[in-house]
Amino acid sequence: MEIKLITVGKVKEKFYRDKIDELIREINCLPKKKINLAEVMDESIPENAGPAIMKSIKEKEGKKILSLINPKDYVVALCIDGKPTDNIMLKELYNKAENNYAESFVLIIGGSLGLSDEVVKRADYKLSISDMTFPHQLMRVLLLEIIYDSLYDC
């Protein structure tokens, strides 16, 4: 089963990009594992944007994310209010998706404003990595490392 990591925005820092590429190669070397990274373009946020504009931006980014998800995908959205999850639980979610014949195991990291309501509603599981706040670029590295560790012995 394919793993898709959908993220909003591009990683600009070379050291993050290099680590992301390394982890993707490592995951793809695991037996019967294939991961693809899809980066959707983030929307620019005007200075002093109000709640209506921020909601509109999340909705635009959400439509881009949803266009990459198939009906038979098992979707995990990273959310502030998600369930704290460890490597064992992520492995169990992956196995559940595989046992239910999901086409792909999809993990989503939203943009700086978070995920749209539509994306969160589509998710089969809402995951929280930590109560701490991390830069989006670092979150990609953390999540890929967790995926690798979780699936290493699947």
Image (cartoon, rainbow, N blue to C red):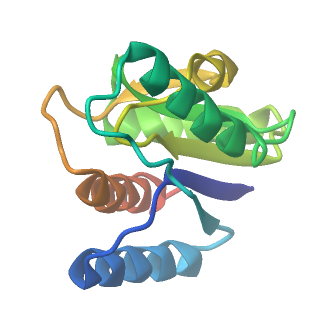
Residue 43, position as x, y percentages in the image: 50, 47
Q: Residue at x 34, y 78 (%)?
A: 17
Q: Residue at x 46, y 40 (%)?
A: 110
Q: Residue at x 80, y 39 (%)?
A: 102
Residue 119 placement: quadrant: top right
Residue 72, position as x, y percentages in the image: 85, 35
Q: Choose between 117 and 98: the one closer to the eye.
A: 117
Q: Residue at x 47, y 24 (%)?
A: 53
Left or right relative to 89: residue 29: right
**Quadrant of the rendering where the N terminus is positioned:** bottom right
Q: Choose between 58 and 152: the one closer to the eye.
A: 58
Left or right relative to 151: residue 3: right
**Quadrant of the rendering where the C terminus is positioned:** bottom right
Residue 120, position as x, y percentages in the image: 57, 21
Left or right relative to 75: residue 77: left
Image vertical order of residue 75 relative to residue 125, above or below: below
Image vertical order of residue 148 relative to residue 114, above or below: below
Left or right relative to 108: residue 83: left
Residue 60 placement: quadrant: top right
Q: Choose between 56 and 36: the one closer to the eye.
A: 56
Residue 62, position as x, y percentages in the image: 62, 34
How many labels were placed on the picture? Answer: 0
Residue 148 placement: quadrant: bottom left
